[in-house]
Image (tube, rainbow, N blue to C red):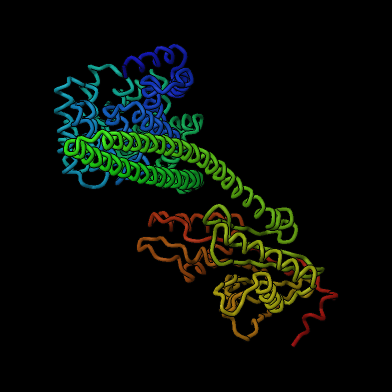
Amino acid sequence: MRWFVLGIVWIFALPLFSQKKALIDSLQKELEKHPKPDSIRLQILIELGWQYRNSNINKAFEYNRDAVYLANELKNEAILARIFNHRGVLYRNISDFPEAEKKFYEALHIAEKYQNLQEIAYANNNLGDLLRLTGNTAESIKFMQKAQEIFKKLKDKRGEAYTYIRLSEAFQKLGDLEKAEEMAQKCLVLRQDLGNQQDLGAALNRVGDVLAIREKYNEALEYYRKALNIAINQNDATAKVSSLQDIGKVFIRTQRYKEAEKPLMEALEIAKNFQSKEQESNIYEFLSELYEKQNNIDKAYFYYKKRQALRDTIFSNQRMLQIDQMRVRFDLQQKESENQILKEKLQKEQIIRILGLVFSFVVLLGGIWIFLNNRKINKINYQLAEKNNEIKNTLKELEEANRQIVAQNKEIEVRNQEIELKNQDFIQSIGYALVIQEAMLPSKAMLDRLLGEYFVIWEPKDIVSGDFYWIAEKEDLLIIAVGDCTGHGVPGALMSSLGVNALNVVVHERGIIQPAEILEQMHQETLIRLHKEVNQLIDGMELGVLVIHRGKNMMYYAGAGIPLYYVQEYQLHVLEANKSSVGSNFRGSEPFSEHKIYLEYPTYFYMASDGFKDQFGGKQNKKFGSKQFKSLLKEFSFLPVEQQKDLLSKNLYLWKKEANEAQTDDITLIGFRYNPIKHFSGASSYENHYQTN
């Protein structure tokens, strides 16, 4: 019946569609045609769950779960071996290895009970693969070899070939590359006989992978090219990208750098067209490695940045998917646990009632035998009737319990849909939050007008940032601020929004323009806005405020945790900041220090959060550090600002890459040139704020 149903589905699907989506659509149409709970609907549910395993894990779980319910309703326990094998694969795909192992053993137990050799073989192979993934490789081989013996006995060449490819991976993990190649070659021979081109391409790639690890690069290239030809003939874009990527990788390993570029670029174009972001990200990594080997740091850095940007997108989507999967898994486990408890309770009650009934029946029979009394016989009959009514009531209770279980399952489906919608809203909200945060920062036009020669490096650790920069003009005064709020991501972004709004109030509405007083007002404003009490532990934000009196060529600076760096005549100077933070209830009564300097020469100013200095990397995987940071500022200060920005960014990139470290914190660095020759020296209506001491 199973193969008959699948044959019907394929007859409908293959003439109309050539891809997996077409098969799924065809199966769903067949499911609509069979609404009654019968064996045909059961087979379609099983196949739908299997086809969705790599594209939509939630739907895969949903159809697999429905198949379990229908199999139980039809009292078809034997088919649960196949369903539980599938369920184990789903749990394995979301890395829930304990649940996967549990389902594979359940499948094995049922298959052995009904002597279903094919499912016994698949369960053993699945358990072996699971042991390989969890590090118990030697033990995994025993299960795979047992599966292989059964497949040979059944003359199931497809199953046997699948076992060979898994054995090849296991022996590779153990370091026995000769055995790994032997298993891969046996898989290849079987799949050549079977003639399935897609499976044959995978076998060719497996042989190529082992040969590449054994540094037999020319032989590996031959297998990769054969796999590529199959992918081209089958119009399989994913397989084509994999083969081209492998060919490019071999060229890099053999230092044939010019030949490596073409297949990698072709793979990149296909991956982009088919929106295969995971493959696109891997290709960027190979291109970055290729150009780094050729000492082309610009291109290596370019493709590294492309990969990082794409990985952030993939990570965000995977994180949402993982959250969704965990919630679905939790709901499934919770409901299944509740249903199991309810069933066990009802079964126990039913057993107790039946035992009571049997006992009563025996007692009554004894009474009949002893007393031979018609009256008591009638009484016994009456009592039996009552017990029968109790049994009927029990059956009704069981039916009601089953209806409740069905209702609970529907409730889970509704919750899953709600979770999916909420996750979509959350992802959109984070995107909108970034747009809003960028809108709160100074525009490029404003920075061009007020600073002229400048650069800005603003790199959030996550999608949104806890760092911000701010600029304002008050007649002859130019006011620049850089802030680093506690935390990063969404909490940090909320604090940075508070900081920008508070600066606008303090400077624009209250007219405060002295740096130290701005910090003091910001401190009070932050405490008020956060409603902070003495016993609350919130660190607030680090903030640096620079004021330049362009009419008098005077500079004033005050910092809370953020120092000011400036270069005059190729000498780097540092104006240290107070160690206390703005908005922190740990701050004492000490006022913020204010520095004043006359700007006689052209000067480069640099203001930065601690993200650059605190970035881990280098050969010893330590922080970049203040000393190295100041050295770079001094070294690059004689260059145009765009070159300064590019060199600082590249140094940071190389520092992270050397230790393969991700970004540690939000990073903000703003640098600009102030030339006193370009400004007049006249009186200002704000002079009364800055009297010469």
Left or right side of 505 for 294: left
Q: Residue at 45% across / 49% down in the picture? A: 297
Q: Residue at 49% across / 70% down in the picture? A: 626
**Depicted 83 relative to depicted 312: above or below:** above
**Depicted 619 relative to depicted 292: above or below:** below
**Depicted 16 relative to depicted 289: above or below:** above
Estimate the x, y position of residue 323 in percent, counting from the top left.
Answer: 46, 47
Q: Nearer the viewer, residue 348 or 515?
A: 348
Estimate the x, y position of residue 517 in percent, counting from the top left.
Answer: 71, 78
**Which quarter of the picture shows residue 46?**
top left
Left or right side of 620 for 669: right
Estimate the x, y position of residue 68 in percent, counting from the top left.
Answer: 36, 32
Number of numbered callouts drawn: 0
- Does residue 252 appear in the picture of this structure? yes
**Depicted 533 relative to depicted 323: above or below:** below
Q: Residue at 41% across / 44% down in the picture? A: 335
The N terminus lies in quadrant:
top left
The C terminus lies in quadrant:
bottom right
**Which quarter of the picture shows residue 56?**
top left
- Does residue 578 appear in the picture of this structure? no
Estimate the x, y position of residue 682 in percent, counting from the top left.
Answer: 84, 74
**Which quarter of the picture shows residue 92?**
top left
Left or right side of 605 for 691: right
Q: Residue at 73% across / 53% down in the picture? A: 445
Q: Nearer the viewer, residue 77 or 517?
A: 77
Most distant residue in the bottom direction: 693
